Amino acid sequence: MTTQAQDKAQAPAAEEITGAIPPHSRMGKLGLTMAWWGVCSALFYIVVAASLAHQFGTLNAIIGMSLSVLTYGAINGVISRYAIRTGLSVALFSRVLFGDFGASLATLIFFATALYYGVFESSVMAVALQAYFPSVPLNLAYLVVIIYGIVLIFGSIQTWLDKLNGVLLPIYLAGLAIAVLLTISSHGYSNDWLFLQPENGPVEYGWWDCYTYYMGVWILMMYTFDYARYGRQEDTAYHARFNFGVPFYLVTFLLSGMAGIFLASTLGTTSEAGVVISLVQLMGFGGLVFAWVTQTRINTANFHLATTNMHSFFERILNLRLPHWIWAVLVGVLAYVIMLADVFSYILQALAYQGVFVVAWVGVALVHILLNPSGMDATASVATGAASHQSFNPRGLLAWFTGTACGLILMHNTGLASFSAPATFLVAAVVYAAAARRGSGYRLSSLE
């Protein structure tokens, strides 16, 4: 192999961490679809729908999920088109929005959030393993799951994660169908799951609470950005409309959610661990395989994005230039320590706060994209180094922090908590748009 060919073969692994993805390193339509659809199979989507149905009623949960499908599809359609057009990552795009300081904060939040989700999903796999093999200590199950998960992401999504998730997708869908059928076979079928109501009676505007709850998972907008940039320009319409659009969320939220409401209602549990244990008891070894398939698929995304953003963060802040596999190992070590420390309640609290920052980020990012749809300002800023040389973009930071502050204040107000995420998004977007009208502060390519 020639030196030029070797450089080209090695390029994607380096480019996906620190630079824009060039055209020759983009993925085919099917490959990127299989890699991305690994995100759809988390048991979280099954359990959260069941929990919302019990808390607010099945109808409200379904309405909330349906509205979320439309919202996610619309926003991620815009985001995916932009990411494909520019090839930028969240880290690079955030430099354009907020300057170096803000980009580092965004990358840190992204890394921490992906890590936390990876910890949760890994713990589910460990619980499933111990449920089938009771003699295995939970700490050993944690270790097995972490080692297994980290080894899978030593490469990139361009190497074999797309192929792995392509193989596992039909297993997940078949497993979900079998779980429903076996539940009906062993417990019988009743329409009661369609008419669940809270113990204290119907909740007025419960659909709104369910809808805004899903805004707490807007980290998927960042996931979309970092995956979509691997798409080819000629596949833009397909990715925006299908791969990252409404069809994906129909499966991720609505299909998984409806199955989750039925399973949890029939099996009598609404906790993630409870659902896993019930499925293992119901399906035996097949339940263990189903749990591992679902969590393996989502954790390839969690650990991959945690690693790439940890890599970006520390390389930028401390100028640490280490091989990518070392960052993957460090993510695994951190995940294992967190699991051993049993700090899940604190992680949930941290995720609530980080979720507000993420929603505000989406508000700023979406407005910037709509004002600069070509992406030429961002790609020029990154290419010339203008974005790297600006420590602070005051207008972007003002919008981001103002939206976040508004959201945090409302989050701690019991009567207005359900308006926290929407207010965060709107305030961040409006402040950013207003600042754009007052000058050319966003045009970093002008070397402001």
Image: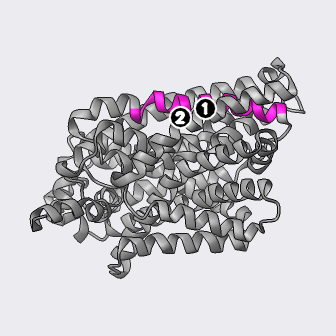
- The label on residue 191 is none
Q: Nearer the viewer, residue 195 or 290?
A: 290
Q: Nearer the viewer, residue 31 or 272?
A: 31
Classify 438 as above or below 251.
below
**Secondary structure type for disc 2:** helix
Give the labeled residue for mark 1.
174
Determine the main secondary structure of the stretch shown in magenta. Answer: helix
Picture quarter containing residue 94? Answer: bottom left
Residue in view at x 51 percent, y 65 percent: 150
Q: Name the residue furthest right.
A: 199
- Describe the colour scheme in one phrase: one colour
Classify 54 as above or below 89.
above
Q: For marks 2 and 1, give the CA distance.
A: 6 Å
- Locate the C terminus by quadrant: bottom left
Give the labeled residue for mark 2.
170
Q: Is residue 176 left or right of residue 79?
A: right
* Residue 421 included in the magenta stretch of the image: no
In percent of width and height, residue 233 lies at 21, 38
Residue in view at x 30 percent, y 48 percent: 229
> How dense is the environment of label 1, judged by Cα within 10 Å: few (below 14), some, or many (20 and up)?
few
**Secondary structure type for disc 1:** helix
- Confirm whether residue 21 shows in the render: yes
Q: Amino acid at mark 1?
A: Ala
Residue in view at x 46 percent, y 28 percent: 246
What span is colored magenta in the figure?
Answer: 243-266
Residue in view at x 53 percent, y 40 percent: 40
In percent of width and height, residue 73 lies at 45, 32
> How dense is the environment of label 2, judged by Cα within 10 Å: few (below 14), some, or many (20 and up)?
few
